[in-house]
Image (cartoon, rainbow, N blue to C red):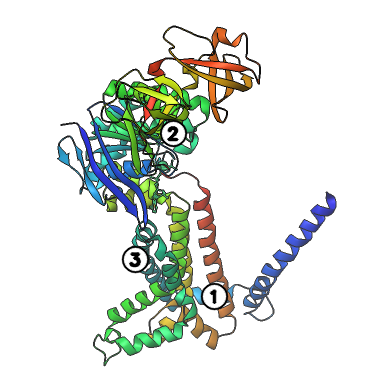
Amino acid sequence: MSARGLARGVIIAFGATYLLLPLAGVLEFAMRMRRGVYSFDAFFTVFEDHRFGDTFLYSTVMALVTVLIGMLIVLPAAYAVRLHAPRLRATVEFVTLLPLVVPAIVIVFGYVRLYGSDSWLPLTDSDFGADALLAFGYVTLSLPYIYRSVDAGLSSMDVRTLSEAAESLGARPVTVLLRVVLPNIRTSILSGAFLTAAIVLGEFTFASLLDRPAFGPFMQLLGASRAYEPAALSLVAFAFTWGLMALIGAIGGRRKGT
Amino acid sequence: MSFLSVRGVKKAFGPAVAVQDFSLDAERGEFVSLLGPSGCGKTTVLRMIAGFEKPDAGSVVIDGEDVTHLPTRARRIGMVFQSYALFPNLTVEGNIAFGLKVAGVAKAEIAARVKEMLELIGLPKLGGRYPVELSGGQQQRVALARAIAIRPRILLLDEPLSALDAKIRVSLREELRAIQRELGITAIFVTHDQEEALALSHRVVVMSAGWVEQIGTPPEVYHTPRTPFVATFVGTANVLPCRIEDVAGRLSFHGAPLALDHALTGVTGGEAMMALRPEAIALAPFEGATNRLDATVRDVTFLGPVARVRVVLAGEIEALVDLHGEATRILPEPGSASVLYFRPESLQLLDRRDRAG
Ligand SMILES: Nc1ncnc2c1ncn2[C@@H]1O[C@H](COP(=O)(O)OP(=O)(O)OP(=O)(O)O)[C@@H](O)[C@H]1O
Ligand SMILES: [Mg+2]
């Protein structure tokens, strides 16, 4: 019993060290900005930079738009496949996994070629066009995560029978989707949404090549030109991501719906 | 015209034919069971009435309206599933109110109807609970309340009691019948449990391998089975070969003369099959038992109210005899010669066709 407890303690300590030691190192480094003493100067410098707020806001809005568009596409698709074409499931899953295989740089190059200034639809010519292009790009990037979480949610309920029950009570397909399916996979949708948000907030390639004022390029810029601030910034971003994860856990932990 | 009329309905899934040819007429307020072994197409028939499957041929008419091509939501039916299928995110009240909300019924009226339904199913205090907080029997009662809250024209039930344990199954079965009678709602009930079908129904549709074998009241189906399948699937029966001797209803079994209680129309001569229930046979003469067959007792199993005797007829054909009450006091010895006595009306001539094969 006690040997077992000891082994467990050692494993936990090892895991915690593995995770926390680098963080502690980064924190220690970030606090050495003022010579001779530890201070939070690097953090203050980051927060005082107006670009921090601007790019963070931009990327947050992007994340929301991405989640919205992604869900609007994926939810009905995953539902319809499950109900009416279960044999297509493997194919659809494969397609949604493609963005993990095709590098972002290839995708964005394709976009620039397809929607550049001299193309039939020059989206990159206007700010709004470029923003839209970025959002669609992000939807593609987050497809694997959104689809998987939605599909996992659908697996956790008896979609077919519940849909048929609702239909027999007079509900139209849209009503079934909104009143029966959606509330029962809320947790999965939230986890997909948070994963997507975390990815979009840190994304560099798309934003940089489309020249958008996003958080990812800002982090990169800071990293290339400063010493202590990038460390502070990465800790802030890390804390934010962890906050999102904790939120998923907290919401997922609540069993009942409202 | 009858209230529900299903005409010549067929359904195939790829090369596999689930329903070969199904027709049924049900009156308003009638309780009809679809009874048959697993895979015989009961659920498929029910799903075609509900509109979840499109029949390949035939039509479904409810209250004079041809609904064959209507989607489920427009058919005004109520459906109860084996797995309850309550919405897990809604309370009991929310579940019962679902159909009414979808139909745009006024709030006050919904509240009143929900209350009425909760009382009908005997759960007036559980309106605020979630499905996970209910027992299986309670969940199925809520599912029933949800289905009838919208005042459907027909109630469709697909093995609603199968997931429950034996005791609840019997009590809920009685409740279901009481509610159905009280509301006077037409019900189609799918089951593979013959006792359930016999106990609940006005009429039973016995199905096998996608075909309708027989439609009749429970006593009709039990006492006058038309096919070997019905004779053996509903209760226990000895299905024996025989020869038809004449149109007056005289038969013979391995040379021994037997008589039916009615004359035959059409058929004369030739080989046939007959059914005889074990409990219709006695090993001693009794009034009206004009049919006799010589037999040898093989073995006897005493079960209290019943003693089951296995006998051999004509040296090779096994048959069962059930002795009841006083007849079980003195049991026959295995190996002894015996005589089976039974009435002409106990003998049922079967259609040669046995689609179940
Ligand atoms: N969606 C489907 N796709 C393919 N085959 C199906 C489908 N639904 C039913 N079948 C087949 O049709 C036949 C009849 O099925 P059905 O579900 O109607 O039987 P059942 O009488 O309800 O059986 P059980 O008592 O097991 O529920 C079966 O052989 C089944 O495999
Ligand atoms: Mg079935």
Please tell me whether residue B274 is drawn above or below residue B54 in the rendered image: above
Q: How many numbered callouts?
A: 3
Chain that bears disc 3: A
* Distance from Cα at disc 3 to Cα at disc 1: 33 Å
Task: Return the residue found at the far right.
Answer: A3
Task: Return the residue found at the far front.
Answer: B255
Which residue is found at the position 31% from the left and 87% from the top? Answer: A114
Which residue is found at the position 40% from the left and 51% from the top? Answer: A159
Please tell me whether residue A117 is drawn above or below residue A84 in the rendered image: below
Which residue position is annotated with label 1? Answer: A233
Asked if the residue at tag 2 contacts the one at tag 3, i.e. Cβ–Cβ closer than 8 Å, the answer is no
Neighbours of disc 1 within 10 Å: few (<14), some (14-19), many (20+) = many
Which residue position is annotated with label 2? Answer: B139
* Distance from Cα at disc 3 to Cα at disc 2: 34 Å
Which residue is found at the position 52% from the left and 77% from the top? Answer: A45
Which residue position is annotated with label 3? Answer: A73
In terms of image quarters, where does ligand 2 lie?
top left
Q: Nearer the viewer, residue B38 or B81?
A: B38
From the image, state whether disc 1 or disc 2 is nearer to you: 2
Chain that bears disc 2: B
Give, as a three-letter code, the residue at label 1.
Leu
Left or right of B165? Residue B299 is right
Give, as a three-letter code, the residue at label 2.
Gln
Horizontal and vertical percent for residue A148? Answer: 47, 64
Task: Return the residue found at the far bottom.
Answer: A118
Where does the N terminus of chain B fall, quadrant-wise?
A: top left
User: Does the beta carbon at disc 3 come under 8 Å from ligand 1?
Assistant: no
